[in-house]
Image (cartoon, rainbow, N blue to C red):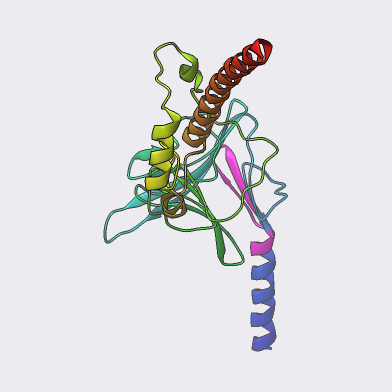
Amino acid sequence: MKKIYLTLIAILSVFQFTYAQWTTGSGTIYTSNNVGIGTTSPLYPLDAYTNVNGVVAVRFTNTSTGTSAVARYMLSNGVNYCGLTLNGSTYPTDPNALTIFAPYSGGALIFETAGTQWMRVTQYGSVLIGKSSQVNTSYILDVAGNARANEVVVNTTGADFVFGPSYKLPSLSSLEKYIRYNHHLPEIAPAKQMQAEGLSLGENETKLLQKVEELTLYIIELNKQLKEQQKEIDELKAKQ
């Protein structure tokens, strides 16, 4: 009989806890598989409800070091805001910003699936794709692999200075000597340097355009010489 009585008490206790409801201030905490804050009809395991503005936050504190972090989601006047507060510093600093989370100072934001890292935002602001570290931190975007796009626009200054009156076009003889000795065009990086360091698309395109414009000037000059020679040939023929 005593065992039956204790069993009934245990069942009633579980039943009472499962369907219990507590009111604290203006908010309501309710549990029925779901827990609601500010609502008696929670739709999710944890449902924080507010009519206008509200904040949901979780605080983590390391008692040995005193380090404290607060991860929060806030709805304020229709603006969604997710952020992190670490030792009094708020990330992001823009209260209207929407972000996934901001790592601690000196950390990295890492994106991975199934345990494989695919992208990383470093503490220096560089975005790494297909790699977890970079040799040269001056590259804001560092990709280990192929990239595909419908169009790539690179800032460049152009090379119209070649057609300016003050530009000195190298003679063909000096150009020939340079190529024989160096095995590459002037102002164009040698192949070994390109293989080791890559090349700047904007700078390289400008240099290539410069060489095309120089080549155009060479052709124009050669055409003038051919016309002069043809004129001399015609004059000699006329005297015969």
Looking at the image, residue 106 sits to the left or right of residue 188; the answer is: left
Q: Nearer the viewer, residue 206 or 166?
A: 166
Q: Measuring from the top left, give residue 181's x and y in whole percent.
A: 37, 46
Q: Is residue 56 visible?
A: yes
Q: Quadrant of residue 145?
A: bottom right
Q: Measuring from the top left, give residue 123's x and y in whole percent.
A: 39, 47
Residue 227, above or below 147:
above
For the point 43% across and 23% down, the residue is: 169
Residue 139, above or below 155:
below
Looking at the image, residue 70 sits to the left or right of residue 39; the answer is: left
Say if the magenta span includes residue 86. no
What is the magenta range?
Answer: 17-33
Say if the magenta span includes residue 18. yes
Q: Measuring from the top left, give residue 171's x and y in whole percent.
A: 42, 27
Looking at the image, residue 182 sits to the left or right of residue 18; the answer is: left
Q: Nearer the viewer, residue 72 or 183?
A: 183
How many labels, in total? 0
For the point 42% across and 35% down, the residue is: 175
The quarter of the rendered structure image containing the N terminus is bottom right
Q: Is residue 32 visible?
A: no
Q: Residue furthest front?
A: 240
Q: Nearer the viewer, residue 80 or 36?
A: 80
The quarter of the rendered structure image containing the C terminus is top right
Q: Nearer the viewer, residue 86 or 155?
A: 155
